[in-house]
């Protein structure tokens, strides 16, 4: 396929990225609000809900690889990816509605069981969308930079959905002042609206996008072979290690932001604004990174984003030592803005680089198994979050953390160490390792030429 044919139209890019609005909304709302909804409104034990989220991470060890392998192996007239997107519409919406609308007649163990099934089920069926969707993105264009354009728009729409989720959280907070019944009614209505919109956006993507016929039936014939190939791919193996180190650091950031806002900065009411200060530059900066990646290269730009993220959060370590509230606010809002810029860069460039690595796998093995690769990276993201959630809980417990009280200086230091110093160390280590990544634009271009020659020869032999 020529570079001209690999150029994607804006309607195609929009159709691919648009479902990210609904998915981003659902993910952030569940990650940030469900624990509070379950404990404060439904009166379920926080320990039980913590175990539910932990189990969902363990189950990912099964669902992610299977979704990747089965997606690669699917043979259907619609293609091997879009049929999965279409099939995910109903279960994704159903489980999301279940999470936010448990029957009022349930209580005790039955209510806890409902929430356990709903949360674990939501993450499982969402995998059936995310892995094939990311895999489809790698297939839509083989051009080195066009992929950044495609995934950059996906990141922007996903972040926009997350911003909408912040608005929903504010609506929930207002409903809480009116009582449990108001929260239940509000959560059900918003869940219905979100599910319908997400279904329409996914349906639009299925209708508008097309798949490459030459990739059909070219996945690995055995699942263990597929993931063995992923690990034996030297470029992929390095990315797996770097991604895990990065995600360990960034997971601490996501988990502790609300704690930092309340107990270190002292302005819990401004927590949504802090998160918004991170998300807006993350979304709006996407057009900035596309020309820069062409000029400086994707590797150098992703390396820059790692260093910027580490330094941005590293400055937060000073917060407990700043006496004035205004000084602490300046610190965390500056931190959030520059970290958001870096996130926009990473969200645009990283899946584009990962897609190039999948081309290298085809060059080595003759197979197209995007699903196996993106399921591996998806599992790394989730497992890092699970590990960091456990570690954060342990550190807070041993430091003497007591909820809803003024924290000691030692507890605040423990918090900012996990929130700032630890991510700084992780991103510096990840960046140092990533300097060894060697798949550049020139090498990738040669790989594409070789693959095109093979496909042309195979087509000629079959005609």
Image (cartoon, rainbow, N blue to C red):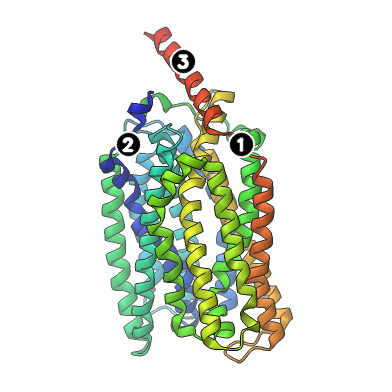
Q: Which badge, 3 or 1, is on the more N-terminal residue?
A: 1
Query: Relative to 403, is 168 above or below?
Result: above
Q: Which badge, 1 or 2, is on the more N-terminal residue?
A: 2
Which residue is labeled 3 in the image?
A: 453
Residue 134: which quarter of the image? top left
Q: Nearer the viewer, residue 66 or 315?
A: 315
Q: Residue at x 33, y 68 (%)?
A: 191
Which residue is labeled 2 in the image?
A: 8
Residue 88 percent across, percent down from the top left:
37, 50
Q: Is residue 435 left or right of residue 66?
A: right
Which residue is labeled 1 in the image?
A: 230
Q: In this rendering, does residue 52 appear at all? A: no
Of the two numbered discs 1 and 2 in the rendering, the one whose residue sits closer to the viewer: 2
Q: Residue at x 51, y 78 (%)?
A: 330
Q: Residue at x 28, y 42 (%)?
A: 10
Residue 150 percent across, percent down from the top left:
38, 43
Q: Is residue 67 left or right of residue 197?
A: right
Q: Is residue 438 left or right of residue 338?
A: right
Distance, label 2 to label 3, CA atoms, is 22 Å
Query: Relative to 228, is 274 above or below?
Result: below
Q: Residue at x 61, y 55 (%)?
A: 246
Task: Determine whether the residue tagged by mark 3 lies in a helix, strand or loop.
Answer: helix
Residue 280: which quarter of the image? bottom left
Residue 410 percent across, percent down from the top left:
72, 84
Residue 196 percent across, percent down from the top left:
27, 60
Outermost residue on the right side: it is: 398
Task: Determine whether the residue tagged by mark 1 lies in a helix, strand or loop.
Answer: helix
Q: Which badge, 2 or 3, is on the more N-terminal residue?
A: 2
Kindly check if marks 3 and 1 are in contact, taking CB atoms under 8 A apart as contact: no
Q: Quadrant of the C terminus?
A: top left
Distance, label 1 to label 2, CA atoms, is 28 Å
């Amino acid at each position: 396929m020529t570079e001209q044919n690999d150029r994607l139209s804006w309607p195609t890019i929009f159709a691919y990225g648009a479902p990210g609005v609904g998915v981003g909304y659902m993910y952030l709302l569940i990650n940030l609000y469900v624990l509070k909804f379950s404990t404060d409104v439904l009166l379920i034990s926080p320990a039980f809900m913590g175990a539910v989220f932990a189990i969902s991470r363990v189950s990912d060890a099964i669902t992610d690889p299977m979704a990747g392998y089965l997606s690669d192996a699917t043979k259907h007239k619609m293609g091997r990816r879009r049929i999965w997107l279409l099939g995910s519409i109903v279960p994704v919406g159903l489980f999301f509605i279940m999470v936010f609308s448990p029957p009022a007649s349930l209580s005790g163990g039955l209510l806890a069981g409902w929430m356990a099934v709903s949360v674990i089920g939501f993450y499982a069926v969402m995998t059936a969308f995310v892995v094939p969707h990311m895999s489809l993105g790698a297939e839509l264009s083989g051009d080195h930079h066009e992929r950044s354009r495609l995934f950059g728009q996906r990141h922007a729409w996903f972040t926009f959905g997350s911003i909408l989720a912040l608005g929903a959280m504010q609506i929930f907070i207002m409903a809480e002042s009116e009582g449990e019944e108001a929260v239940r009614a509000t959560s059900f209505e918003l869940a219905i609206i979100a599910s319908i919109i997400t279904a329409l956006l996914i349906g639009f993507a299925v209708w508008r996008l097309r798949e490459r016929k030459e990739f059909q039936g070219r996945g690995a014939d055995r699942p263990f072979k597929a993931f063995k190939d992923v690990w034996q791919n030297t470029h992929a193996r390095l990315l797996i290690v770097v991604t895990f180190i990065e995600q360990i650091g960034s997971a601490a950031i996501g988990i502790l932001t609300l704690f930092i806002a309340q107990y270190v900065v002292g302005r819990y009411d401004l927590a949504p604004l802090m998160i918004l200060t991170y998300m807006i530059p993350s979304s709006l900066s996407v057009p900035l990174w596309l020309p820069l990646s062409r000029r400086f290269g994707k590797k150098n730009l992703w390396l820059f984003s790692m260093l910027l993220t580490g330094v941005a959060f590293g400055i937060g370590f000073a917060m407990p030592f700043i006496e004035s509230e205004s000084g602490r606010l300046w610190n965390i809002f500056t931190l959030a803005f520059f970290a958001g810029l870096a996130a926009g860069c990473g969200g645009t460039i990283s899946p584009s680089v990962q897609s190039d690595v999948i081309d290298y796998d085809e060059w080595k093995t003759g197979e197209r198994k995007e699903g196996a690769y993106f399921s591996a990276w998806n599992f790394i993201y989730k497992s890092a979050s699970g590990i960091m959630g456990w570690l954060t809980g342990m550190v807070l417990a041993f430091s003497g953390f007591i909820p809803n009280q003024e924290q000691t200086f030692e507890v605040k230091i423990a918090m900012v160490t996990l929130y700032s110093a630890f991510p700084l160390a992780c991103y510096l280590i990840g960046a140092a390792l990533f300097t060894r990544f060697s798949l550049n634009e020139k090498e990738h271009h040669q790989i594409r030429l070789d693959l095109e020659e093979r496909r042309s020869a195979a087509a000629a032999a079959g005609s």
